[in-house]
Image: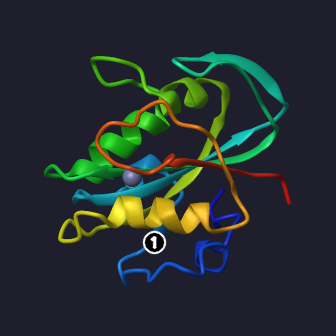
C-alpha cells in the first residue's frame, strides 16, 4: 500500500504535527533515526483472541493503530521493522505483539523527533479524542495513557 489509507492529520485534528511526519510503505524505507511511530495494521475478519491481562477479547475487522516510540540510534528502522516482520523483542510479549500476529501491516507513519519526550503520549491523547475507539492496552506502566492502541472500522 503505497498511499496511506487515512489522512492522519484529518483523523487527529487536535494534534500539532511535526514537519517531519511521513508515511512509510515498506520497512526498507524506514529512517535510521529515533522518534515516534504509528503502526497501521488491518484485521480482515473479526477474531477472537486471548490477550495478556485482558483475557478473551473479540477484535472487530478493520484498522488498528499503535503509537510507540523508538529513541535509540536508528530506533525507528529497528523497532518498526521488528513489528513489521513480526519479530518480537526478547522479553514479555506486549498487547501489540499479540495483535500483530493476527493482522497485516499496512505501513507506518514516522515522526523523527526525539526532542519531545511526551510526543508518543500526545499522539495517543489525540487518538483518544478522535472518532477512533480505544483498545484497552495491558502495557500500562511507563505512562498514564489509557492506551496506545486504537481502532477504526473499514472505510
Ligand atoms: Zn502514553
The residue under the point 66% across, 25% down is 102
Q: Is residue 146 above or below residue 136?
A: below
Q: Is mark 1 within 8 Å of ligand 1?
A: no
Q: Provide residue 133's location: percent of width, then percent of height.
A: 70, 52
Give whichever of 116, 81 is nearer the camera.
116
The residue under the point 37% across, 59% down is 120
Give whichever of 105, 124 is nearer the camera.
124
Q: Provide residue 6's location: percent of width, then percent of height.
A: 69, 68
Which image quadrant for residue 20?
A: bottom left
Quadrant assignment for the N terminus:
bottom right
The residue under the point 33% across, 48% down is 143
Give whichever of 57, 112 is nearer the camera.
57
Furthest-left residue in view? 73
The residue where tag 1 is placed is 22
Quadrant assignment for the C terminus:
bottom right
Which image quadrant for residue 105?
A: top right
**Left/right of residue 109 with respect to residue 101 in the rendered view:** left
The residue under the point 55% across, 23% down is 98
Name the secondary structure under disc 1.
strand
Total tally of numbered discs in the picture: 1
Q: Provide residue 89's location: percent of width, then percent of height.
A: 31, 25
Q: In this view, does 57 lie above or below 119?
A: above
Density class for disc 1 (Cα within 10 Å; few <14, some 14-19, many ≥20) is some
> How is colour applied across the structure in the image?
rainbow
Q: Is residue 53 above or below residue 42?
A: above
**Left/right of residue 101 with respect to residue 143 in the rendered view:** right
Amino acid at each position: 500500500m503505497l498511499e496511506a489509507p487515512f489522512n492522519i492529520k484529518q483523523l487527529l485534528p487536535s494534534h500539532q504535527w511535526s514537519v517531519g511526519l511521513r508515511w512509510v510503505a515498506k520497512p526498507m524505507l524506514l529512517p535510521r533515526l529515533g522518534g515516534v511511530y504509528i503502526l497501521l495494521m488491518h484485521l480482515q475478519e473479526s477474531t477472537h483472541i486471548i490477550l495478556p491481562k485482558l483475557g478473551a477479547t473479540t477484535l472487530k475487522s478493520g484498522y488498528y493503530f499503535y503509537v510507540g516510540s523508538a529513541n535509540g540510534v536508528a530506533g525507528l528502522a529497528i523497532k518498526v521493522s521488528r513489528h513489521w516482520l513480526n519479530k518480537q523483542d526478547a522479553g514479555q510479549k506486549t498487547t501489540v505483539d499479540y495483535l500483530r500476529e493476527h493482522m497485516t501491516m499496512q505501513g507506518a507513519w514516522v515522526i523523527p523527533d526525539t526532542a519531545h519526550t511526551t510526543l508518543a503520549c500526545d499522539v495517543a491523547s489525540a487518538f483518544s479524542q478522535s472518532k477512533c475507539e480505544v483498545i484497552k492496552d495491558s502495557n500500562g506502566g511507563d505512562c498514564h495513557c489509557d492506551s496506545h492502541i486504537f481502532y477504526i472500522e473499514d472505510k
